[in-house]
Image (cartoon, rainbow, N blue to C red):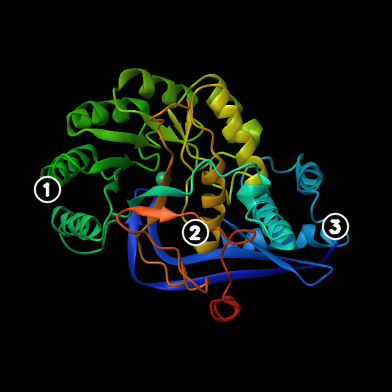
Amino acid sequence: MRIRDVKIYALSAPLSEPFAYSQGWVESRGACIVEVIGEDGTSGFGEAFGPPKPVAAIVAHYAPELIGSDAFATDEIWQRLYNRLRDHGRKGLPIEAQSAIDIALWDLKGRALGLPIYRLLGGPLRTRVQAYATGFYRKRAGDPLKYLLEEAETRVASGFTAIKLKLGFGIEGDIALCRAVRKLVGENITIMVDANHAYDATAAIALGRQIEDYRIAWFEEPVPPEDWQGYRETKAALKIPIAGGEAEFTRWGFRKLIADRLLDILQPDTCAAGGISECKKIADMANAFGVRVNPHVWGTGIGMAAALQVLAVLPHNPPGLFPIEPVLEFDQSEHPFRMEVLQEPIVQRNGWVEIPTGPGLGVEIKRAALERFRME
Ligand code: CA
């Protein structure tokens, strides 16, 4: 199937109430959605993590090259596009743009063949996945120890049995939050923490030692993504498993993290690290080195559907009667079009999400939403 056309949708919507993570305030949500259209009119959709307009410009740069290409030759296209900008951008925006294209091609391939992507990848190894609630961002006003505890109650009441707290707002406040949330939710709820690389290794270790007693399932992005030695020291010093990788890209970017076992849990983002093709390769590399993989997810339902297809084929590490299963990141913060872009939203029930079984990504796109949230 030859590619007939490529359409690009840069979407954005303001938030009703801005929220902060350790690196700044989020005032709006955005996404770059890519539609690849085959010669028979079949469409595939993909999403890129990252600022929509610059990503869209790179997708537009690739579009003339894509038209006329064999849409099923996902690895050939991946390699060709990567090589075009290899000398200029081996991480970041070019790979995010390529991720959206790759996901759209897989969606198109699955729709044309009438199979979900996980079937084309040799799965499924699982048909549903446990979700954890991401949220717990800071507001401009109010006492975080009050509104974040209320949020914890809300998430648990909605069915989640795992929640991830945002840290990186100062060590003492971070410790107080972990203590208060553990006390509130009891022992049966899983708690992860995420500093969004707010600390250096010295501070991350000091913080980690103080929260080890609260049974933290993982400590995500304790240090900046470039600080590999900091990851090594943090992992060696703490009992808490160390997670990271949402700001890493491609098999080459993940190579050292995996081979040197700089962290316990790898978190490639399907919409950033190189798409479904590349995340499968990264996951298999991680499997060979005994490192867990839990994809990072922070976009719309299109990106989440892509992550679910990857989750369906993540190998067990190791297999057995009771293997450790990967989990789905389910962002609960405000996003005006997270599920609006889908005709049927992806939902969790009792903390579990069914992996869509329809062709391609398994979700149908609401085209009206793509137009409604389109940037000028
Ligand atoms: Ca994170």
Which residue occupies 16% across, 39% down?
A: 187
The amino acid type, in three-letter code, at marker 2 is Gly
Q: Which residue is mark 1?
A: 184
State the quadrant of the C terminus: bottom right
Work out whether residue 252 or residue 51 is closer to the camera in this orientation and state it: 252
Q: Are marks 2 and 3 in contact (CB under 8 Å)?
A: no
Q: Is residue 328 left or right of residue 102?
A: left
Q: Earlier in the sequence, mark 2 or mark 1?
A: 1
Q: Which residue is mark 2?
A: 299
Vertical side of 375 occupied by 32: above or below: above
Q: Quadrant of residue 214?
A: top left
* Residue 193 visible in the shown view: yes
Work out whether residue 363 or residue 279 is closer to the camera in this orientation and state it: 363
- Which of the labelled discs sits on residue 65, or is there none? 3
Is label 3 in a helix, a strand or a loop?
helix
User: Gap in Å between the C-alphas at discs 2 and 1?
Assistant: 29 Å
Vertical side of 328 occupied by 37: above or below: below
Mark 3 C-beta closer than 8 Å to ligand 1: no
Q: Quadrant of residue 186?
A: top left
The amino acid type, in three-letter code, at marker 3 is Glu
Mark 1 surroundings: few (<14), some (14-19) or many (≥20) residues within 10 A = some
Is label 2 in a helix, a strand or a loop?
loop
State the quadrant of the N terminus: bottom right
Work out whether residue 101 or residue 27 is closer to the camera in this orientation and state it: 101
Mark 2 C-beta closer than 8 Å to ligand 1: no
Q: Horizontal and vertical percent for residue 205? A: 29, 26
Q: Earlier in the sequence, mark 1 or mark 3?
A: 3
Q: Horizontal and vertical percent for residue 132? A: 34, 49
User: Gap in Å between the C-alphas at discs 2 and 3?
Assistant: 27 Å
